[in-house]
Amino acid sequence: MRTVFYPASERGNVDIGWLNSRHSFSFGNWYNPEKVHFGALRVLNDDIVKAGMGFGAHPHDNMEIVSIPLNGSLAHKDSTGTDGIINTGDVQIMSAGSGIRHSEYNPSSSDAANFLQIWVIPKSRNIQPRYGQKTFDANNRVNNWQIVVSPDENDQALWINQDARFALAKIDEGKELSFTPKFKNNGVYVFVIDGEITVDNKLINKRDAIGVSDTDGFSIKANKASEVLAIEVPMLA
């Protein structure tokens, strides 16, 4: 098993007033040649958006874009005709494909919104753009992996144009949870939303991450109550 530790303290930080974003991988004006991607996982931005502020309409293509609100809500509008709100507990995905335009902003007049924006390199290029959004019951991820993004309809998750899966878990203190990749030779990027875990005898704290590859499975132990996001992706060259 191969592991790579990604400390939260080494993330890039861009603060432009209305947006405070921490980048796990090179993004925009922040570039680190050692942090460009983990396999097909290209972007993981931890964004805090001030009340009433947001991103104006802008284009994307040939990227799978997942948004996971951690606190607050986002108003979303795009060129597929989608116009709505994603709230904490929801997961959103856009397959940008041949091209899509979208905007998103924090509809609250008083509270900041915190969300994870995640990009995955697609399996097939120039597909017809599509949008997906689903509300997930957080009770179903207590000491259990709740699959929220997957190409397999049997997972009852949001569809993604890649052999990739996203899973969320809330792990009680002292509990251990195993993870088995669905696709052969995939790696897994384990991001600690909150808490403290141990993977392969390595201590991983809040907003730290560890990339795990070359394994058929591994275990996560929660040293304190923790919330974890596991992103399984092909390990691209």
Image (cartoon, grey):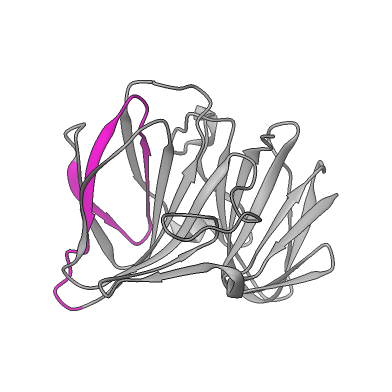
Residue 1, above or below 22: above
Q: Residue at x 62, y 69 (%)?
A: 208
Give the residue displayed 16% in from the left and 34% down from the top.
81
44, 170: nearer the viewer: 44
Left or right of residue 198: residue 15: left
Above or below, 65 against 3 in this view is above
Q: Which residues are magenta?
A: 83-110
Q: Quadrant of the C terminus?
A: top right
Which quadrant of the structure image shows residue 117? Answer: bottom left
Task: Give percent across and percent down for residue 151.
Answer: 52, 30
Quarter of image, res 111: bottom left
State the image coordinates of residue 48 (x, y, percent, origin top left): 35, 70
| x, y percent for residue 65 | 41, 43
Residue 83 at x, y percent in the picture: 16, 43
Residue drawn at 25 percent across, 58 percent down:
74
Q: Residue shown at 59%/50% (left/top)?
A: 36
Residue 98 is inside the magenta segment? yes
Q: Main secondary structure of the magenta part?
A: strand
Task: Return the residue nearer the eye: 103 or 219.
Answer: 103
Q: Nearer the viewer, residue 24 or 131?
A: 24
Is 10 on the left-hand or right-hand side of 129?
A: right
Above or below, 94 relative to 198: above
